[in-house]
Image: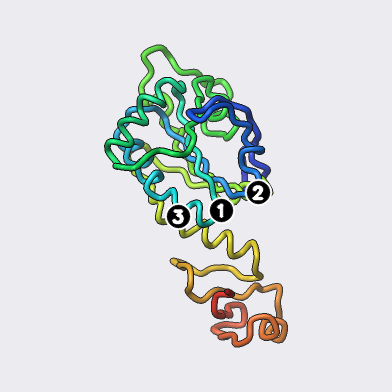
Amino acid sequence: MALRINDIAPDFTAESSEGTINFHNWIGDNYAILFSHPKDFTPVCTTEFGAVAQLAGEFAKRGAKPIGVSVDSVEEHMKWKSDIEGFSGTAVTFPILDDTSLSIAKLYDMLPAEAYLPDGRTPADSATVRTVFIIGPDKKIRLMIIYPMSVGRNFDEILRALDAIILTDKEEVATPADWRKGEDVIVSMALDDDAAKAKFGEIDVKLPYLRTTKMPS
């Protein structure tokens, strides 16, 4: 079965650049950003790891923990970290999981169950290992984005989506297209106009099914 939004994220125990990690225990009461890579020492992935390292403070402010997974060993990860830190000018403080066994990539439906990597493998052999998952404190998958190997991920968008997920977990609202933190939000259709006004104060009825209000503080 393919993974879907609101499925429980598969748990696993794996070695990482920060030691042994039991994934659900590691998440704890936080949000987690699991982002996967087809191989160490690849150009696009190096820029992505550098971007996440530079955004460490932004993730921490949101109670979110990034974690990378690549189909190489901890030993290779530790060597690659030096390149990432030299390129980005920032320390890599988040774990990078060892998935030489491909078990995590298969658990998360990034590779077919029968997949294996040949000797002398290249990133093309594991090109599908290019997914971002946002996972909630309840261990449910809240977002999945899959990128091709040639396209670097937009971590500003991942932060934007994380902000929306955190807000809509707490409030009876949704967010419109291109929403950013602080902008107006959409009132849940579960609330009628009177209930919405009692909860949020002023609402703007743009259509019977589309009502906006100020973002709750």
Rendering quarter of residue 173: bottom right
Up-down relation of residue 81 to residue 50 (above or below): above
Badge 3, how many Cα within 10 Å: few under 14, some, many 20+? few
Where is mark 1, residue-wise?
63
Instruction: Give the mark, 3 or 1, whose residue is nearer the N terminus.
Output: 3
Q: Quick one: SS at disc 2? A: loop
| 3D distance between C-alphas at marks 3 and 2 | 17 Å
Up-down relation of residue 214 to residue 152 (above or below): below
Where is mark 2, residue-wise?
29
Specify whether 5 is left or right of 91.
right
**x and y percentages locating residue 162 in the rendered image:** 52, 56
Which residue is depicted at the point 58% across and 35% down?
Answer: 108
Comparing 64 with 100, the one in front is 64
Q: Label 3 is placed on what type of residue?
A: Glu
Instruction: Give the mark, 3 or 2, whose residue is nearer the N terminus.
Output: 2
Q: Quick one: SS at disc 3? A: helix
Which residue is depicted at the point 51% across and 25% down?
Answer: 99
Query: Residue at the top extreme?
Result: 119
- Contact, mark 3 vs mark 1 (Cβ under 8 Å): no
Q: Quadrant of the C terminus?
A: bottom right
The mark tally for this picture is: 3
Where is mark 3, residue-wise?
58
Up-down relation of residue 7 to residue 170 (above or below): above
Which residue is depicted at the point 48% across and 47% down?
Answer: 145
- Contact, mark 1 vs mark 2 (Cβ under 8 Å): yes
Which residue is depicted at the point 56% across and 29% down?
Answer: 104
Instruction: Give the mark, 1 or 2, whose residue is nearer the N terminus.
Output: 2
